[in-house]
Image (cartoon, rainbow, N blue to C red):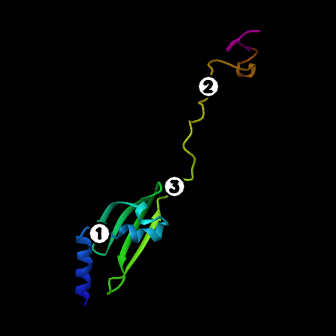
Amino acid sequence: MKSLQALGLLALLATGCNPLPAWTSGQVGCAEEQIVITRDEMGFAGRTWTAVCRGKTFYCTSVNTGPQGAMQVSCKEEAQSDAPPPSAPPPSAPPAATGCQYDTQCKGDRICKEGQCVDP
């Protein structure tokens, strides 16, 4: 009986009938005809595919959950970043002034005048 079910599943896949839109529909809330399937990959224990519907991308997986060929399907929407797009870096500090800016930067009784320490 198991081999007959496996043969039936294989025949279904071989005929070009793609069950993925039907499997995906209930997971993502889109009608089968609105779903576009890409990146369909079969593995030993399951199957993965990408489904696109109404501009949203979903990553789906199916795994065989029992001897009767029962499948468990789950789809998760592609994560959208909540972070705002990167903005321009803050303006850099103006170049450091050469010379003095205050009288206290000058030695002794000298004062700062136009960036230079000079005698009063």
Which quarter of the picture shows residue 93? top right
If the image is split into quadrants, where does the C terminus sit? Answer: top right
For the point 31% across and 75% down, the residue is: 45
Q: Which dot, 2 or 3, sits closer to the camera?
A: 3
Task: Identify the magenta region.
Answer: 110-120
Pointers 1 and 3 in contact (CB under 8 A)? no
21 versus 109 height, above or below = below
- Residue assigned mark 3: 80
User: The residue tagged with tag 2: helix, strand or loop?
Assistant: loop
| Residues tagged 2 and 3 counted as in contact (Cβ below 8 A) | no
Residue depicted at x 47% and y 59% = 78
The residue at the point 46 percent across, 71 percent down is 26
Residue 94 disc label:
2
On screen, residue 83 versus residue 101, left or right, reads left
Marks 1 and 2 sit apart, C-alpha to C-alpha, by: 67 Å
Place residue 103 in its image quadrant: top right
Q: Is residue 39 above or below residue 62?
A: above
Q: How crowded is mark 3: few (under 14 residues within 10 Å), some or many (20 or more)?
A: few
Q: Is residue 31 left or right of residue 119?
A: left
Question: Which picture quadrant has residue 94?
Answer: top right
- What amino acid is at disc 1? Cys
Q: Distance between the residues labelled 2 and 3?
A: 38 Å
Q: Nearer the viewer, mark 1 or mark 3?
A: 1
Of callouts 1 and 3, which one flags the residue occurring earlier in the amino acid sequence?
Answer: 1
In this rendering, the count of numbered labels is 3
Q: How far apart are marks 1 and 3 (CA)?
A: 32 Å
Instruction: Give percent across and percent down for residue 119.
Output: 73, 9
Residue type pointed to by label 3? Gln
Q: Nearer the viewer, residue 1 or 103?
A: 1
Q: Label 2 sits on what residue type?
A: Pro
